[in-house]
Image (spheres, rainbow, N blue to C red):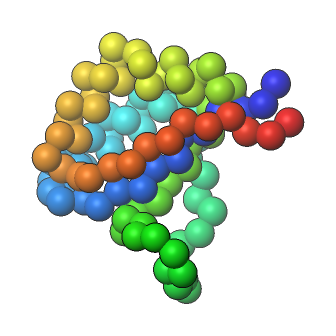
Amino acid sequence: MPKGYWVNQSDITDPEKMSKYSTAVREFLGREGARTLFITDYSRYEVVEGSPRSRQLVQEFPSYEAALSAYRSAEYQAIRKLRRDAALLDLLIVEGLE
């Protein structure tokens, strides 16, 4: 079964508020069986098209359905409110390849 991914990029506007969100979401994601993939540290990069945000993360879930379910859960929607006014975020949920 293909894995599911949250692919997000963000600009943090309030580090203190974002810290509260980050703590809560890490605990939640762990319970959901997700893990954060660190695929780059941005030591070298060049924007060749578009306008990326300053921070990119990928969270891997056991399946696409698990990724959608986690996002839609009442628990995550409550945690998501902690991010309000803390960051601008673009989030895409995708199914991985087999």
- What residue appears at the point 25 percent right and 59 percent down from the top-left corner? 12
Quarter of the image that includes the N terminus: top right
- Give residue 25's position: percent from left, percent from top: 37, 35
* Image-based side of 82 in relation to 38, left or right: left
**Could you tell me if residue 43 is visible in this image?**
no
* Image-based side of 72 in relation to 92, left or right: left
Check the image and name the residue furthest to the front.
49
- What residue appears at the point 43 percent right and 43 percent down from the top-left corner? 91
- What residue appears at the point 35 percent right and 24 percent down from the top-left corner? 76
Please, is residue 48 above or below residue 55 in the view?
A: below
Check the image and name the residue furthest to the right.
98
Please, is residue 71 above or below residue 24 in the view?
A: above
| Quarter-of-image position of residue 51 | bottom left
**Could you tell me if residue 50 is visible in this image?**
yes
Quarter of the image that includes the C terminus: top right
| Quarter-of-image position of residue 9 | bottom left
Please, is residue 41 above or below residue 60 in the view?
A: below
Q: Nearer the viewer, residue 84 or 23?
A: 84
Q: Nearer the viewer, residue 43 or 91?
A: 91
| Quarter-of-image position of residue 74 | top left
Please, is residue 54 above or below residue 86 in the view?
A: below
